[in-house]
Image (cartoon, rainbow, N blue to C red):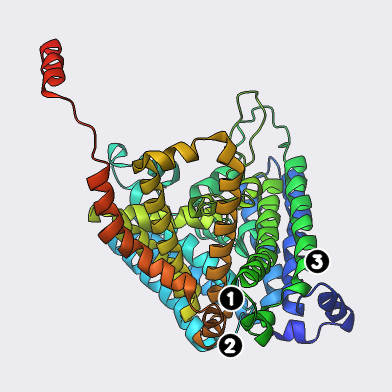
């Protein structure tokens, strides 16, 4: 759904968008990310040493201008959320009821917008940044709740993020509208933001400017490289090709090849966004994370992507810890770990994935994508378990000669299962997803469902019979007992 501001865009902007394989709203959004770099540099250079009030005001005004250029008067929705959440925090903040109301209101506001504004595809409208804001405001309610507990009741993680008092309206506005995290991830806590504006993060008694320009520009360069890769690859693997008769009539290996490179094209686009937003946050100084053993400053507190890990990921766990990191950490911190009382890792994991699915929207594709992530993670844990149980497999895995072949197999597996799940996330509707999956005769889906059952009901019992755990002989046990006594 295009806004008035984009409908009136000059033809030059439309021509440039077409050359890059983007539509005008997407190109404007890209320019918004890039505008964050000079704005963050101004903050880092000219607002250093200024009062937090000036910084909150600067971030709020700059972001509202950028948001208006993208969404027009629809920026009112974020303002409404800020005001209502502020009222909630200053009245009953820190109570279990405040957390429940925050979760209910923020999710309901977002999901209601999805219902009324959803079209047949992806739209860059005000709900795009609002989904980021939803997590941020819910997390703030949780952090204030944690801040009312006794110190010994908090986990190590909660000690880092909890806040003792509700923020002022200007503090919450600055936190909400910090342009490095309003339009896309990363997620970061209110406590980090407040420490950043008070210049507590740097531990800099000399008043020197933070040395964040070079690391910020490094992320900018990597982001540009990802944009180049996406523009180079996307024309050869458009979404429409997955729905074509040519794809349906291709062999399964070729379909795997297409899904791998089609998904890489999209991941390049998403990766560029993570690198740009992290770069903006770094330029401002928000991502300072202490120093390494050599005394060099670390700028990785708001990491959204770890390219070296993600590009050669071989299991789903690698993807979780290297792609969209801050959102995954948010889901772990405020959903997965909060369900610890259930005492069941798989229920907590499934709940976290269900939350992420519905946070994206109501399209069936979201749920299919995250269900596949659950099954793939489960299958990989079963294969790892079998490898440990079978001596022959353990020997193969530990043999250097098999390192590269096993790496190549696992790499192809990981890229394919990611592409297969991403197809559902991108195509959204079952009518389109069915075209792709039926072209592959549902073979991946059938494998995801049958392998866990086969392993649990057939393979695992046989492994337990064949490879019984070694036990000590009574004679040895007696000696050990005697020694212990």
User: Residue 323, located in which quarter of the rendered image?
Assistant: bottom right
The spot of residue 384 in percent (x, y) is 41, 47
Residue drawn at x 26%, y 52% is 462
Categorize mark 3 by other alpha carbons within 10 Å: few (<14), some (14-19), many (20+).
Answer: few
The spot of residue 457 in percent (x, y) is 26, 61
- Mark with earlier residue (3, 1): 3
- Mark with earlier residue (3, 2): 2
Secondary structure state at the residue bearing disc 2 = loop
Q: Of the residues tagged 3 and 2, which is closer to the observer?
A: 3
Q: Is residue 14 shown to the viewer in this render?
A: yes
Alpha-carbon span between mark 2 and mark 1: 11 Å
Categorize mark 2 by other alpha carbons within 10 Å: few (<14), some (14-19), many (20+).
Answer: few
Alpha-carbon span between mark 3 and mark 2: 26 Å
In this view, the residue in front, 474 or 323, is 474
Residue drawn at x 61%, y 30% is 291
Q: Is residue 394 above or below residue 78?
A: above
The spot of residue 14 in percent (x, y) is 83, 81
Secondary structure state at the residue bearing disc 3 = helix
Furthest-right residue in view?
12
Secondary structure state at the residue bearing disc 1 = helix
Residue drawn at x 53%, y 81% is 433
In this view, the residue in front, 289 or 346, is 346
In this figure, which residue is indicated by the disc labeled 1? 426
Q: Are marks 3 and 1 in contact (CB under 8 Å)?
A: no
Q: Of the residues tagged 2 and 1, which is closer to the observer?
A: 1
User: Residue 211, located in which quarter of the rendered image?
Assistant: top right
Task: Name the side, left or right, on which 342 lies relative to 99.
Answer: left
Q: Is residue 417 above or below residue 466?
A: below
In this figure, which residue is indicated by the disc labeled 3? 232
Task: Name the side, left or right, on which 122 lies relative to 392.
Answer: right
Alpha-carbon span between mark 3 and mark 1: 20 Å
In this figure, which residue is indicated by the disc labeled 2? 120
């Amino acid at each position: 759904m295009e806004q008035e501001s984009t409908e009136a865009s000059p033809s030059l902007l439309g021509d440039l968008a077409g050359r890059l394989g983007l539509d005008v709203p997407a190109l404007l959004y890209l320019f918004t990310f890039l505008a964050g770099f000079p704005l963050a540099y101004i903050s880092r250079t000219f607002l250093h040493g200024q009062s937090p009030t000036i910084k909150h005001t600067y971030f709020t005004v700059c972001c509202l201008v950028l948001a208006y250029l993208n969404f027009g008067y629809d920026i009112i929705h974020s303002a409404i959320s800020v005001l209502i959440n502020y009222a909630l925090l200053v009245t009953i903040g820190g109570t279990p009821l405040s957390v429940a109301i925050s979760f209910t209101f923020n999710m309901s506001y977002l999901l209601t917008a999805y219902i009324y504004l959803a079209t047949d595809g992806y739209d860059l409208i005000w709900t795009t940044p609002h989904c980021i804001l939803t997590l941020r405001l819910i997390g703030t309610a949780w952090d204030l709740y944690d801040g009312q507990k006794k110190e010994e009741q908090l986990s190590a993680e909660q000690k880092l993020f909890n806040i003792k008092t509700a923020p002022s309206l200007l503090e919450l506005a600055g936190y909400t509208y910090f342009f490095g995290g309003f339009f896309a991830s990363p997620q970061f806590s209110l406590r980090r933001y407040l420490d950043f504006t008070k210049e507590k993060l740097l531990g800099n008694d000399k008043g020197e400017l933070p040395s964040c320009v070079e690391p910020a520009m490094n992320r900018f360069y990597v982001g540009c490289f990802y944009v180049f890769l996406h523009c180079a690859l996307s024309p050869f693997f458009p979404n429409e090709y997955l729905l074509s008769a040519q794809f349906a009539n291709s062999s399964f290996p070729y379909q795997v090849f297409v899904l791998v490179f089609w998904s890489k094209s999209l991941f390049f686009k998403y990766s560029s966004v993570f690198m740009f937003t992290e770069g903006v946050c770094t330029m401002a100084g928000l991502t300072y994370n202490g120093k390494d053993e050599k005394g060099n400053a670390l700028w990785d507190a708001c990491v959204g992507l770890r390219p070296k890990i993600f590009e050669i990921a071989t299991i789903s766990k690698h993807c979780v810890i290297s792609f969209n990191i801050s959102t995954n950490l948010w889901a772990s911190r405020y959903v997965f770990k909060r369900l610890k009382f259930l005492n069941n890792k798989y229920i907590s994991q499934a709940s976290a994935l269900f939350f992420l699915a519905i946070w994206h929207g109501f399209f069936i594709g979201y749920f299919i994508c995250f269900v596949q992530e659950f099954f793939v993670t489960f299958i990989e844990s079963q294969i790892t378990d079998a490898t440990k149980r079978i001596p022959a497999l353990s020997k193969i895995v530990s043999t250097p000669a098999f390192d590269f072949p096993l790496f190549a197999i696992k790499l192809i597996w990981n890229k394919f299962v990611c592409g297969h799940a991403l197809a559902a996330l991108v195509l959204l509707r079952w009518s389109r997803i069915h075209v792709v999956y039926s072209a592959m005769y549902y073979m991946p889906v059938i494998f995801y469902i049958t392998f866990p059952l086969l392993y649990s009901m057939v393979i695992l019992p046989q492994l337990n019979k064949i490879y019984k755990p070694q036990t000590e002989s009574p004679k040895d046990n007696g000696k050990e007992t005697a020694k212990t006594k």
